[in-house]
Amino acid sequence: MAYKSNAPLLEKYLSLDQKGSIQAEYIWIDGSNQLRSKTRTLKEAPKSVADLPEWNFDGSSTGQSEGHDSDVLLKPVAIYADPFRKGDNILVLSETYNPDGTPNMTNYRAAALKIMEAHADAHPWFGIEQEYMLIDVETEKPYGWPKGGYPEAQGKYYCGVGAGKVFGRDIVEAHYRACLYAGVNCSGVNAEVAPGQWEYQVGPCEGITMGDDLWMSRYLLNRVAEDFSVIVSIHPKPVAGDWNGAGCHTNYSTAAMREEGGIKAIEDAINKMSLRHNEHIAVYGEDNNLRLTGRHETGHIDTFSYGVANRGASIRIPRHVSKEGKGYLEDRRPASNIDPYRVTAIIVESSLSA
């Protein structure tokens, strides 16, 4: 039987006085692009991230070091309010470093931060649309799907309302509120094209904050789903066949794009990005070839294309952006399982190169 947390019983203990102590949940990305976390007690609330102590973990158990030299360091980079323990307790997003002070091989934030700092004058803004599928732990099928066979074909589920169309809204609502409480810039949610599939949007965020907020939103989603005994899948093709895949459409603009006449800066950026299509695809998610087939509202993985209001293109210029002559572009190539630090970094680097 699937385990479900006993919220009323847990609340009995969470309401106990902590006697001034703070629980800090240190969160990091492991060697398989998965999230890990562990807790330590602080004697007082930090005023900023600089007040937080560094920590360490066994990297040989997370695919980030060898057993004979297993310590990997955790360096705090961002603080969020903890919606699970509440009070003054916090979530601490951390970078991973080797004992010699160099970034761990799976620490993509460090390199991304350098790129964002180098192009800070351009004020790069991002908004990422995180698609995902809820999976039933008992049937191992998408949440809400019949135990035998398949649901009705796609069509009625996108932004759907009502039983038989929507599955898991309670999980989605809980996650949305947890994000807002934590301080993640979650800007919206909607049911997606396949049944049991959802999307939420994070942004607009400037620079490195995009990656920070998206990773924290994923942590919160997995923690919320854990309470409901439901699995979260961010695989780009969670169900084979005539079902939509899952992406992380990445909306991007610079100050020049947002100003009057910004459409020229948008087109210039797209042209520069087109020259590095293969480099982008290399960091746009594992198994993305299963999703970027040219079907189900995607462009083909081997071909770069762009167009106004074209959801079958690599990059879409929204209709209102074309009409107003300024705004942003939407890169539709990133898969749902991207590392947002790698994606935002290469977009900035390639679009703003000389």
Image (spheres, helix red, strand yellow):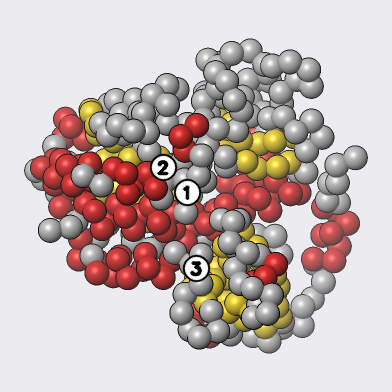
Pointers 3 and 2 in contact (CB under 8 A)? no
What residue is drawn where x is 51% and y is 65%? 106
Q: CA distance from mark 1 to mark 2?
A: 7 Å
Q: CA distance from mark 3 to mark 2?
A: 21 Å
Q: Residues within 10 Å of mark 3 (few under 14, many from 20)?
A: some
Q: Earlier in the sequence, mark 3 or mark 2?
A: 3
| Image position of 309 (left or right of 180) | left
Q: Amino acid at mark 2?
A: Pro
Q: Position of residue 254 (x, y in %)?
A: 22, 53
Q: Position of residue 114 (x, y in %)?
A: 32, 70
**Where 88 sits versus 252, above or below?**
below
Pick the residue in front: 350 or 221: 350
Residue 157 appears in the rendering: no
Residue under numbered circle 1: 338
Q: Position of residue 229 (x, y in %)?
A: 78, 43
Residue under numbered circle 3: 105
Pointers 1 and 2 in contact (CB under 8 A)? yes
Quadrant where the C terminus sits is bottom left
| Image position of 40 (left or right of 260) | right
